[in-house]
Amino acid sequence: MGFAQAWDEVSEAELTPWYREQVSEDRTRVRQMQAVRDGRPPDPPRTDDELLTAALLAGVAHDADLFRALMETRCSITTLADVLARPGLADRIHEAAAGRERTPPPGPDREQLLALLA
C-alpha cells in the first residue's frame, strides 16, 4: 500500500467523522440563524441526531454528566456520534431536556440589540 492510499484511509477513518459532524451542525445552526433573521421560529430538528443534539444542548444546564459529555465533543476528545451511542445516555438526555428549551444566552435579544444599535 502506498503512502497516499494509507493517508487517505486513515483520514477517512479518523478525520472524516469529525468533519461530517461539524458540517451537519453548522448547517443546522445556519438554518436557525436564518429563521431568526426572517423573524420566524427555527424549524424543528430534521433528523434523529439533530433532535438528540438539541435535547443535549437543552439538558446540559441541568445535568453535569451531560455537560461533561458535551465538552468531550467540543474539545475534540470524542465524536458526538460516539457520545450519543453510550448506553442509556439518550434516555438521560431526554429526561434532562424534558419540558425545557435551550437556555438563551445572556444579553439582549435581537429586537433589543437592534434598538441599542439604532
Image (cartoon, rainbow, N blue to C red):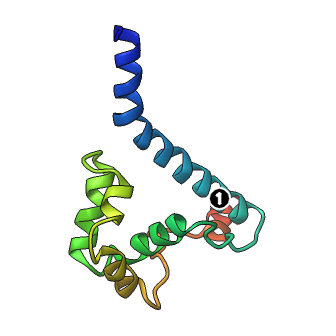
- The residue drawn where x is 36% and y is 76% is 90
Label 1, secondary structure: give it: helix
Instruction: Name the quadrant of the N terminus.
Output: top left
Kind of residue sitting beneath label 1: Met
Residue 12: x percent and y percent? 42, 31
> Badge 1 local density, few (<14 within 10 Å), some, or many (20+)?
some
- The residue drawn where x is 28% and y is 47% is 75
Residue 85: x percent and y percent? 33, 65
Residue 84: x percent and y percent? 35, 65
Q: Residue furthest front?
A: 1
- The residue drawn where x is 38% and y is 25% is 9
Q: Is residue 50 above or below residue 23?
A: below
Left or right, 43 with respect to 9, comes to: right
Q: Residue furthest top?
A: 2
Give the camera-side residue of 95 and 110: 95
Q: How many marks?
A: 1
Q: Is residue 23 above or below residue 7?
A: below
Q: Which quarter of the picture shows residue 61?
A: bottom left
Which residue is identified by label 1? 33
- The residue drawn where x is 47% and y is 48% is 21
